[in-house]
């Protein structure tokens, strides 16, 4: 019966119908432990499309699953039939009515977009899950999501007024109905079913604020106003498909303060939480110390409550926070109040990222959801947590609880072994025991994320068999064909089947990188992505984040970090993506990865897609002809050295300036026609260094540093190297360049080894261009030669100053991960310093010249992700360079923006943050860009308001009056 579904859907659906390998692979999983392979994905344009899809699928007996952001943690956004993706078209905010404090939205609207639309009216939607930047209103309605502010504003069900729902009609067809209070629009048979079970409905539900499990059928009681809209919240798409929602908005406080209360342990924090509720806080969030990797900025303790207060003014909000602190004083070990917005955001990021960071125990062990959000009455939370910890110990498991202590809701990821049969059996035993424990404390198996497959099998423990049978009868009234999200919540799949890990290879995959954080296992590296989808944000992250620029440019899940990780997972599984490393689907998804490494730092679980891309390209093209760009730009260091040796830079520049010749060269080299070929320096930095007298002229008597002549600085921007030498020497440092022969080191300098090795010559190279194009054998050979040349530097323990952030990042990360068995690799990586780090650590008493001008520009993405920019910030501050640099990625990203077919995405990335920041800058503003790619993007964007950028070393050298 499933045959012909795609063709039938294409005939009646105006939206997108996609049954491709890529579309199916992207939707096999949500953020849970579960995996199912769908037939295909439909992105409907409107409710009529939804009606049409349901009609076709009913006719052929194919299940339908509604999906929003795909961040569900109980498995309810996965299915084997047709997946409805509402994020592409049905994502509009239809109306915001400030007077009535309501908004009308389509199901694919991301929560943050609604908050932005309501903010000018001083309003907001109350519930705010930690995934607010990518979760959708439809998903929130399906799960009855809550978030950190539920103590003040309740769950999604508390804030929904009406729902437009496509449901089955008695004649077997489907129709959109508007459901609110009263029985209007309800399916035939629902009212008599409810009225026949009033006694059970009045006695069968625990009374607690976070009861999300099961169907909220008590909302249909006459004393509760027969609220169909409220009842449908949390039904997980098993009864009907929401196509529009009218939601309530609440008044947003004008100012907020955050009281951070420290306690000896989590039980003490949990027992204190309920006592703070009468004081009217907006949030009471709890977190234990074993979740927090960096405790700087937090008061001293073993656990913390984050208690937020609001007011009409900052003073009023702070005064309320002070009341909280005084009321809690007897039980706390310490406390603080944070009232500046930036400080609050920094603390909340720790909490919001917990759903990802909790997936790794402090020792690196994997941890998983499954019992991620049980809730008990707030007054019972302390005893429950103690019993919960005891149950973990009894089963030999570990977890890091955190969550909504004010509502009695606890999140936790547990180090289940879901890869082996014994571990899965323990997972089941623990689940059964924990369900009993939660019920014994008067709680709900789900307090936020729904039952899905993870907990629905155990609902009889919570509700008893009679209530569960009533849920099944309700399901049959709404969905007699069992079409909608079967196996979820009612008549569920077993909690230990369809596990996402079952399809992965059990033996390690043969790979090139060492994957030190994943035990050398590429499968474990791919498993890092748990689907929380922080990479799917539609707008650039605040606070200088980077991930994921290609998704924000295209809006396509394929080009998100999560999407690429899903395709790699399916490549390893071999069921949907069947041709392994030769997969064109994986190759095409990785094609628009900029290798910015933003995910390495911004992803809560540290997915490193740049490394995975290099790994894939290596295997994909092994023994095969590569794209032309891999030879033209991947081999850039080799070509530029040829130009330098033959002294042909002027000729190359002249030829590149001849339009027809340049066009031919770009076409042959796989370079975008829109790009200008950068000019090659007629004198390299290394040549200037030798002509200047080299070490003999490096007159500082301070610590010796080795300045790395990276390819970009040496051949394309030698003025940066010259400026850095001048500044480092002005700071009293003695500068040397790496040897070009195998040498030994003495305190007075380098000297040749007195053996045959003196004949071996070469130039050091970080291998970046080879790595980014997946030429890992070549990269490894280049890096081994570099280690040979750098042996005396490494042996002497000299710091290595690298001016180009991407090269510094490659030495810090790619070098030791490609050569994990060579101890020299780790030692060289550890010696790498940025320009600012070198000045700060080796010349701490040196004061830079005062520039006293504002700055604009961009922090290099690799600097942000790998190196950190704290030293650069402090150096700019000491020099009087005021203002913040933008985050994101410039879009050029080494070879990426030059490759044919990438130009539009490259420019879109630049237009996100970098170019607007430069356009808004005044004439007196210094445009800073330490990366050659960033400077080139600015230079080639003059028509878009770009202005030349400079390395910080150039700016300081100019201020010193020693401009080269």
Image (cartoon, rainbow, N blue to C red):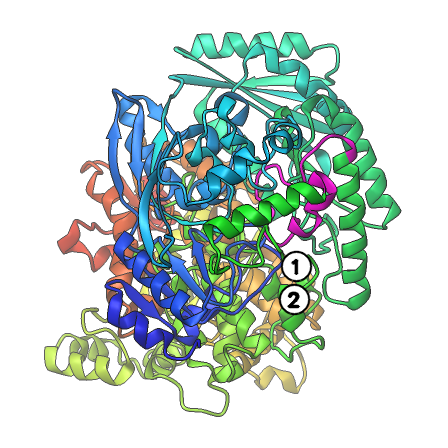
SS under mark 2: helix
By secondary structure, the bulk of the magenta-drawn segment is best described as loop
- Percent position of residue 264, x then y: 77, 24
Residue 501 is labelled as 2
- Percent position of residue 748, x then y: 62, 60
Mark 1 and mark 2: Cα distance apart in space: 55 Å
Mark 1 or mark 2: name the one nearer the start of the chain. Answer: 2
Q: Is residue 414 visible?
A: yes
Q: Residue at x 54, y 13 (%)?
A: 280
Instruction: Tell which tag, 1 or 2, sits nearer the viewer.
Output: 2
Residue 187 is labelled as none
Residue neighbourhood size for the residue with mark 1, other residues' Cα within 10 Å, grouped as few (<14), some (14–19), many (≥20): few
Q: Seen in the image, is 891 located left or right of residue 875?
A: left
Tell me the magenta residue range.
440-464
Front residue (pair 618, 286): 286
Q: Are marks 1 and 2 in contact (CB under 8 Å)?
A: no
How many numbered marks, from 0 up?
2
Residue neighbourhood size for the residue with mark 2, other residues' Cα within 10 Å, grouped as few (<14), some (14–19), many (≥20): some
Q: Seen in the image, is 367 located left or right of residue 531?
A: right
- Percent position of residue 755, x then y: 67, 84
Q: Is residue 359 visible?
A: no
Q: Residue at x 73, y 27 (%)?
A: 381
Q: Quadrant of residue 465?
A: top right
Q: Seen in the image, is 463 located left or right of residue 854?
A: right
Front residue (pair 951, 813): 813
SS under mark 1: loop
Front residue (pair 490, 867): 490
Residue 747 is labelled as 1
- Percent position of residue 362, x then y: 72, 48
Q: Residue at x 67, y 26 (%)?
A: 304
Q: Seen in the image, is 35 located left or right of residue 502?
A: left
- Specify the farthest residue to the left: 659
């Amino acid at each position: 019966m499933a045959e012909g579904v795609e063709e039938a859907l294409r005939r009646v659906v105006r939206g997108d119908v996609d049954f491709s390998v890529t579309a199916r692979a992207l939707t096999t999983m949500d953020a849970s432990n579960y995996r199912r392979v769908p037939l295909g994905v439909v992105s409907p344009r409107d409710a009529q499309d939804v009606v049409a899809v349901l009609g076709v699928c009913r006719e052929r007996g194919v299940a339908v699953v509604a999906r929003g952001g795909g961040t569900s943690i109980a498995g309810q956004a996965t299915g084997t039939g047709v997946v409805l993706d509402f994020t592409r078209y049905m994502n509009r905010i239809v109306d915001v009515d400030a007077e009535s404090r309501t908004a009308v939205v389509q199901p694919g609207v991301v929560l943050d977009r609604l908050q932005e639309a309501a903010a000018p009216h001083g309003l907001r939607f109350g519930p705010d899950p930690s995934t607010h930047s990518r979760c959708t209103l439809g998903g929130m309605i399906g799960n009855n999501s809550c978030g950190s502010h539920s103590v003040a504003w309740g769950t999604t069900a508390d804030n929904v007024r009406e729902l437009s729902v496509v449901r089955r009609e008695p004649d077997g067809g489907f129709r959109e109905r508007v459901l609110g209070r009263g029985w209007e629009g309800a399916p035939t048979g629902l009212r008599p079913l409810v009225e026949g079970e009033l006694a059970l409905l009045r006695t069968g539900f625990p009374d607690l604020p976070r009861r999300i499990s099961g169907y909220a059928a008590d909302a249909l009681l006459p004393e509760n106003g027969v609220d169909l809209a409220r009842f449908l919240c949390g039904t997980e798409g098993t009864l009907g498909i929401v196509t529009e929602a009218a939601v309530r908005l609440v008044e947003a406080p004008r100012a907020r303060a955050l009281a951070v209360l420290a306690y000896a342990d989590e039980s003490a924090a949990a027992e204190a939480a309920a006592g703070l509720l009468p004081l009217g806080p907006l949030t009471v969030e709890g977190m234990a110390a074993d979740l927090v990797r960096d405790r700087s900025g937090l008061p001293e303790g073993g656990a913390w409550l984050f208690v937020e207060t609001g007011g009409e003014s900052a003073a009023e909000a702070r005064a309320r926070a002070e009341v909280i602190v005084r009321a809690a004083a007897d039980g706390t070990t310490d406390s603080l109040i944070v009232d500046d917005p930036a400080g609050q955001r920094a603390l909340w990021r720790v909490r919001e990222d917990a759903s990802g960071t909790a997936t790794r125990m402090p020792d690196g062990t994997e941890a998983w959801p499954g019992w991620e959000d049980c809730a008990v009455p707030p007054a019972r939370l302390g005893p429950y947590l103690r019993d919960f910890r005891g149950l973990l110990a009894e089963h030999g498991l570990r977890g890091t609880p955190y969550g909504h202590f004010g509502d009695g809701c606890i999140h936790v990821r547990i180090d289940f072994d879901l890869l082996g049969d014994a571990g899965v059996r323990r997972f089941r035993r623990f689940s059964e025991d924990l369900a009993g424990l939660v019920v014994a404390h008067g709680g709900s198996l789900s307090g936020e994320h729904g039952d899905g497959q993870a907990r629905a099998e155990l609902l009889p423990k919570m509700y008893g068999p009679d209530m569960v049978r009533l849920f099944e009868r309700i399901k049959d009234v709404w969905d007699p064909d069992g079409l909608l999200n079967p196996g979820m919540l009612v008549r569920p799949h077993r909690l230990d089947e369809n596990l996402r890990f079952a399809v992965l290879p059990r033996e390690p995959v043969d790979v090139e990188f060492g994957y030190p954080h994943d035990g050398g296992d590429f499968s474990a590296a791919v498993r890092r992505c748990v689907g929380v989808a922080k990479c799917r944000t539609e707008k650039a992250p605040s606070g200088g984040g980077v991930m994921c620029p290609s998704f924000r440019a295209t809006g396509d899940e394929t080009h998100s970090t999560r999407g690429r990780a899903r395709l790699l997972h399916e490549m390893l599984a071999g069921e949907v993506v069947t041709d392994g490393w030769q997969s064109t689907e994986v190759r095409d998804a990785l094609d628009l990865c900029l290798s910015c490494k933003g995910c390495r730092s911004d992803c809560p679980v540290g997915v490193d897609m740049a490394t995975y891309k290099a790994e894939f390209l290596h295997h994909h093209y092994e023994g095969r002809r590569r794209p032309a760009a891999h030879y033209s730009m991947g081999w850039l260091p080799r070509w530029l050295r040829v130009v330098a040796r033959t002294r042909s830079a002027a000729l190359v520049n002249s030829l590149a300036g001849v339009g027809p010749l340049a066009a031919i060269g770009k076409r042959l080299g796989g370079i975008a026609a829109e790009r200008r070929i950068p000019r090659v320096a007629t004198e390299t930095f290394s040549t200037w260094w030798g002509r200047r007298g080299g070490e003999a002229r490096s007159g500082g008597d301070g610590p010796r540093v080795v300045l790395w002549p990276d390819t970009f600085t040496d051949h394309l921007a030698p003025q940066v190297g010259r400026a850095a030498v001048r500044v480092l020497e002005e700071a009293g440092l003695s500068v040397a360049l790496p040897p070009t022969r195998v040498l030994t080191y003495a305190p007075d300098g380098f000297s040749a080894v007195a053996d045959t090795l003196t004949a071996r010559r070469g130039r050091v190279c970080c291998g970046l261009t080879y790595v980014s194009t997946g030429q890992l054998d070549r990269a490894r050979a280049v890096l081994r030669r570099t280690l040979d040349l750098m042996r005396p530097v490494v042996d002497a323990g000299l710091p290595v100053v690298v001016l180009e952030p991407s090269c510094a990042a490659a030495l810090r990360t790619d070098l030791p991960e490609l050569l994990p068995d060579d101890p020299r690799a780790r030692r060289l990586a550890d010696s790498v310093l940025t320009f600012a780090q070198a000045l700060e650590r080796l010349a701490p008493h040196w004061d830079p010249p005062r520039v006293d001008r504002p700055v604009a520009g961009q922090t290099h993405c690799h600097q942000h992700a790998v190196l950190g920019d704290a030293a650069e910030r402090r150096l700019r501050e000491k020099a009087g360079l005021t203002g913040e640099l933008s985050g994101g990625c410039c879009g050029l990203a080494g070879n990426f923006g030059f490759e044919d077919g990438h130009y539009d995405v490259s420019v879109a990335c630049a237009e996100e943050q970098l170019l607007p920041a430069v356009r808004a800058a005044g004439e007196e503003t210094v445009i800073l860009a330490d990366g050659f790619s960033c400077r080139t993007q600015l230079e080639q964007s003059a028509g878009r308001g770009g202005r030349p950028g400079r390395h910080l070393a150039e700016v300081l050298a100019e201020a010193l009056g020693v401009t080269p």
